[in-house]
Image (spheres, grey):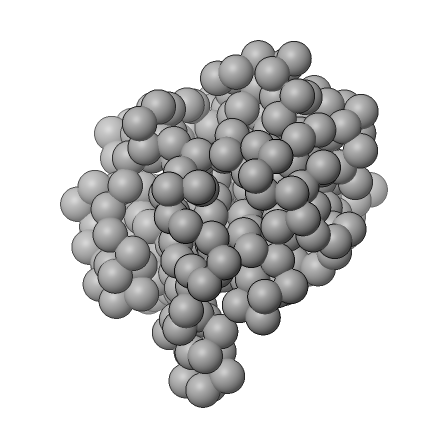
Amino acid sequence: MYANFTKHTGIKINRLDGKEDELLERIKNEGANGPADLLITVDASRLEVADKAGLFQPWQSKVLEARIPAALRTPNWVAFSTRARLIVYNKAAIKADMVQTYEDLALPRLKGQVCVRSGSHPYNLSLGGAMIAHLGEARTEEWAKGLVANFARSPKGGDTDQIKAVASGECGVAISNSYYLARLMRSSKPEDLLVVKDLGVAWPNQKSWGTHINVSGAGVIKTAPNRDAAIRFLEYLSSDEAQAYFADGNNEWPVVSSAKVKNPALDSLGSFKSDALPVGQLAANAVLAQKVFDRAGWR
């Protein structure tokens, strides 16, 4: 994908891969002397942390305004692919009608059945931010307390670990990002295919506000030495060709409607109604979500 941009524009890209927190700290420390033009990362709450730290500048592009839906961009950063936070359940232990909403996961009937990663993880904080926007702080805290009461074990590991725990029967239901499930479904390893064989999948809240989605995105660094080239790269990421490559590379969905991706795993899960909440709003609620989860004991 990067090489193709250089081929089309002649602009060379120097790419540095790293953990999100490490990259943010490096950009902060280097300040005006830093070489960074762009930060590309996952999750709206992480992008918002970078923005609140003053690392981004307005991107200003007619191309991006035309191609990226308004709900999937803010003045300082832009989303390029989406993923859903879905519910995975063990079909031998849990009936589908028991897990049709995020709120269902906090009901007493699922006591000892829920597996989920840490409440301090950005994926869950963004979900909490969405729930605060839809339900309010008090009801979200009540939900989090019910969720904690239903834990099959203390939160640990990543989303793939939660899926495997459901498959093994350690818990009956888990919350996971969609691409973790799709990755297992598309795996060439027999043991991965065995994990997903007897799992059920629910798109939460289809009769209310829709399934929570999050994003991968990017912003232009405030001190970017090559701002114009950085904007051109963002515009390139919104092209149909790059959108398909970017999304399919991580089993996600493109944000540009004209971009076509054929992903047999995601396609087999069917279509769903997604939450229309602007990503900037759920990101802005992430700090409050952390406080709510801390009070509920979800750590």
**Residue 208 visible to the viewer:** yes
x, y percent for residue 251: 39, 60
State the image quarter where residue 198 is shown: bottom left
Q: At 24% across and 29% down in the image, what residue appears?
A: 66
Q: At 52% across and 16% down in the image, what residue appears?
A: 135
State the image quarter where residue 170 is shown: bottom right
Seen from the viewer's position, the closer of residues 159 and 206 is 206
In this image, 201 relative to 140: left or right?
Answer: left
x, y percent for residue 22: 76, 52
x, y percent for residue 171: 61, 58
Query: Compared with residue 252, is residue 130 higher up or lower down, i.e. above or below?
Result: above
Query: Compared with residue 157, is residue 189 higher up or lower down, i.e. above or below?
Result: below
Seen from the viewer's position, the closer of residues 254 and 52 is 254
In this image, 171 relative to 214: left or right?
Answer: right
Query: Compared with residue 246, is residue 46 higher up or lower down, i.e. above or below?
Result: above
Seen from the viewer's position, the closer of residues 222 and 90 is 90
Q: Quadrant of the N terminus?
A: bottom left
Q: At 40% across and 38% down in the image, what residue appears?
A: 100
State the image quarter where residue 266 is shown: bottom left
Q: Quadrant of the C terminus?
A: top right
Q: At 45% across and 63% down in the image, what residue appears?
A: 92
In this image, 136 relative to 55: left or right?
Answer: left
Instruction: Give the mark count.
Output: 0
**Residue 34 visible to the viewer:** no
x, y percent for residue 33: 75, 42
Query: Compared with residue 172, is residue 126 higher up or lower down, i.e. above or below?
Result: above
